[in-house]
Image (cartoon, helix red, strand yellow):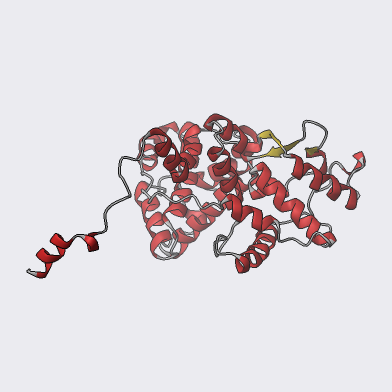
């Protein structure tokens, strides 16, 4: 059977275009791949179009809209997940329109499918006190506890994404003054993030205990599991959840669910509350657009409250008279 034009373009898009020309991260490729796996399943199960029969002519705006509605209604996906799948499809369509200019009009009609508006999400983060309590939970008298302390300290102090954390190699850590860590983020872009002295001390001890202080170990993963393999996202989430649960037993300032990305949000919020400029926070977090970083400024009500208190005097006097002592008022009320 002759391959369809859709199959040829999708193969080139996933295996060549995204990797060689766009240089996107492997996680982005996995996400785009999963989008089209779901799309092919929808075509097969709902539209009765087998994968080997799907062509660009059938890949219309109506089919794509039906697929997005199916994600929400049948698979119970959130609006943000729906929009994520649409982003992958838009990227594929932009690629195809240059490969198939004769079909430009239907392709652009499909590209015009808008993202669905979502309620603005609240940036979940920990207060400095909650973060301090969380970092106090690992057992510093055990080897595993000290590893977990190093892991959580780096995750918070660098504001790293969890994938950036587990991808860290020993050679990415520079503990000489000024101490920095080199993170590889989305699109394989690298950035250097400064380390605070307490984190430097924890990492120095960790590297010595784990025998990672030799240059020959530079390509080794910085954090590993019991089998000496690189940690997974699920592994990091499990470690964090364990200590969050013990911290919450001591104080309710720790929320019921603490996810790895909340530590990144917490670092950004704490930097903002300390007066650090948004441009520096953007570079620190590895954001491409300042608009992404501005979400922290919109969320930081505590900083807004302090700024208002400093800008305006207290115009309302809280030393109000006690109405219970006003006999005229009491007499009037009793006659009602």
Q: Tell me residue 328's x, y (percent).
A: 13, 60
Q: Is residue 333 above or below residue 124?
A: below
Task: Look at 51% across and 37% down and name the residue there.
Answer: 293
Furthest residue in direction left, as rendered:
335
Q: Is residue 135 left or right of residue 221?
A: left
What count of labels does the image hold? 0
Q: Is residue 222 above or below residue 51?
A: above
| In-front residue for pair 73/169 | 169
Q: Tell me residue 268's x, y (percent).
A: 57, 42
Q: Tell me residue 177's x, y (percent).
A: 80, 31
| In-front residue for pair 57/148 | 148
Q: Tell me residue 62's x, y (percent).
A: 34, 51
Name the quadrant containing residue 336. bottom left
Name the quadrant containing residue 201. top right
Task: Look at 66% across and 37% down and name the residue there.
Answer: 188
Examine the rendering and report whether any part of residue 170 can be seen.
yes
Task: Look at 43% across and 36% down and name the residue there.
Answer: 307
Name the quadrant containing residue 253. bottom right
Q: Is residue 72 left or right of residue 191?
A: left
| In-front residue for pair 29/292 | 292
Task: Look at 54% across and 61% down and name the residue there.
Answer: 255
Examine the rendering and report whether any part of residue 225 can be seen.
no
């Amino acid at each position: 059977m002759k391959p369809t034009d859709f199959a040829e373009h999708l193969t080139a898009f996933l295996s060549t275009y995204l990797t060689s020309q766009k240089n996107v991260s492997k996680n982005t490729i996995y996400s785009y791949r999963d989008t089209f796996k779901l799309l092919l399943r929808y075509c097969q199960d709902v539209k009765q179009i087998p994968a080997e029969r799907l062509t660009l002519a059938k890949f219309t705006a109506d089919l794509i809209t039906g697929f997005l509605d199916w994600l929400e209604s049948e698979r119970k996906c959130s609006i943000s997940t729906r929009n994520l799948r649409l982003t992958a499809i838009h990227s594929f369509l932009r690629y195809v329109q240059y490969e198939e200019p004769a079909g430009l009009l239907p392709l652009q009609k499909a590209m015009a499918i808008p993202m669905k508006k979502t309620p603005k999400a609240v940036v979940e983060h920990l207060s400095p006190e909650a973060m301090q309590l969380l970092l106090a939970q690992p057992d510093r008298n055990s080897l595993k506890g000290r590893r977990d302390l190093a892991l959580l300290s780096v995750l918070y102090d660098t504001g790293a994404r969890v994938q950036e954390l587990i991808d860290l190699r020993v050679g990415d850590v520079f503990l000489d003054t000024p101490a920095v860590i080199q993170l590889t983020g989305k699109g394989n872009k690298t950035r250097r993030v400064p380390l605070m002295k307490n984190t430097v001390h924890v990492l120095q001890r960790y590297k010595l205990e784990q025998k990672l202080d030799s240059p020959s170990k530079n390509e080794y993963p910085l954090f590993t599991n019991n089998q000496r393999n690189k940690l997974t996202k699920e592994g990091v989430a499990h470690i964090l959840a364990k200590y969050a649960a013990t911290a919450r037993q001591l104080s309710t300032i720790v929320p019921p669910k603490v996810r790895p990305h909340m530590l990144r949000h917490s670092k950004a919020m704490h930097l903002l509350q300390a007066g650090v400029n948004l441009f520096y926070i953007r570079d620190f977090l590895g954001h491409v657009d300042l608009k992404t970083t501005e979400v922290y400024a919109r969320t930081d009500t505590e900083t807004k409250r302090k700024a208002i208190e400093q800008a305006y005097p207290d115009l309302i006097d809280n030393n109000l008279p006690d109405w219970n002592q006003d006999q005229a008022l009491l007499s009037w009320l009793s006659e009602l």
